[in-house]
Image: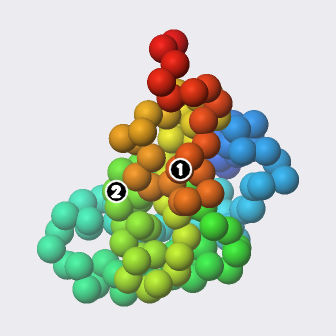
């Protein structure tokens, strides 16, 4: 998606993310949009069996993330999420990896208790409505 749809879709996604988390909380990577670095987990590489090589390639993305100083990374897909989460663990980078839908559901008050595994301690107990309240 990074290269296929170009900067226009990247701008649309940034608009949506900023609407959910607040523009003041958004930190962009450099390079970004269609010039952003691949995490190294896509295209089947996550399941390829070349874990050592995948993690070595992923050092580029890990450093890019660390350079932002951000505590959360929004991953575009399952492969990116799994790869970046593993990079954070392996290189002891201490950032959380979430899907955009998790933050969107959290902001709407509909993220269930079992869907909070990747949230940091700062967000695990955030509820817009009381969890026992029926919708």
Q: Which mark is residue 59?
A: none
Cα distance in 3D space between marks 1 and 2 = 23 Å
The image quarter in which residue 90 lies = bottom left
Circles 1 and 2 in contact, beta carbons < 8 Å: no
Q: Is residue 91 left or right of residue 27?
A: left
Q: Is residue 115 left or right of residue 49?
A: right
Q: Is residue 12 visible?
A: no
Q: Is residue 59 left or right of residue 42?
A: right
Q: Residue at x 55, y 60 (%)?
A: 121
Above or below, comparing residue 79 to residue 60 in the picture? above
| Mark 2 residue crowding within 10 angstroms, few (<14) / some (14–19) / many (20+) | some
Q: x, y (%) of residue 92?
A: 47, 84
According to the image, label 1 marks what residue? Answer: 124
According to the image, label 2 marks what residue? Answer: 79
Q: How many marks?
A: 2
Instruction: Classify mark 2: helix, strand or loop.
Output: helix
Q: x, y (%) of residue 6?
A: 61, 48
Q: Is residue 46 visible?
A: yes
Above or below, comparing residue 3 to residue 17 in the picture? below
């Amino acid at each position: 998606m990074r290269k296929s749809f170009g900067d226009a879709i990247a701008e649309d996604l940034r608009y949506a993310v900023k609407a959910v988390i607040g523009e003041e909380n958004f930190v962009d990577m450099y390079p970004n949009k269609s010039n952003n670095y691949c995490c190294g987990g896509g295209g089947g590489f996550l399941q390829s069996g070349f874990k050592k090589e995948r993690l070595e390639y992923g050092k580029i993305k890990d450093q890019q993330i660390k350079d932002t100083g951000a505590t959360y990374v929004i991953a575009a897909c399952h492969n990116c999420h799994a790869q970046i989460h593993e990079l954070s663990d392996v290189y002891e980078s201490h950032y959380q990896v979430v899907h955009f839908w998790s933050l969107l559901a959290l902001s709407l008050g509909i993220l269930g208790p079992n869907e909070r595994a990747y949230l940091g301690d700062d967000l695990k107990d955030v509820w817009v409505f009381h969890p026992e309240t029926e919708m």
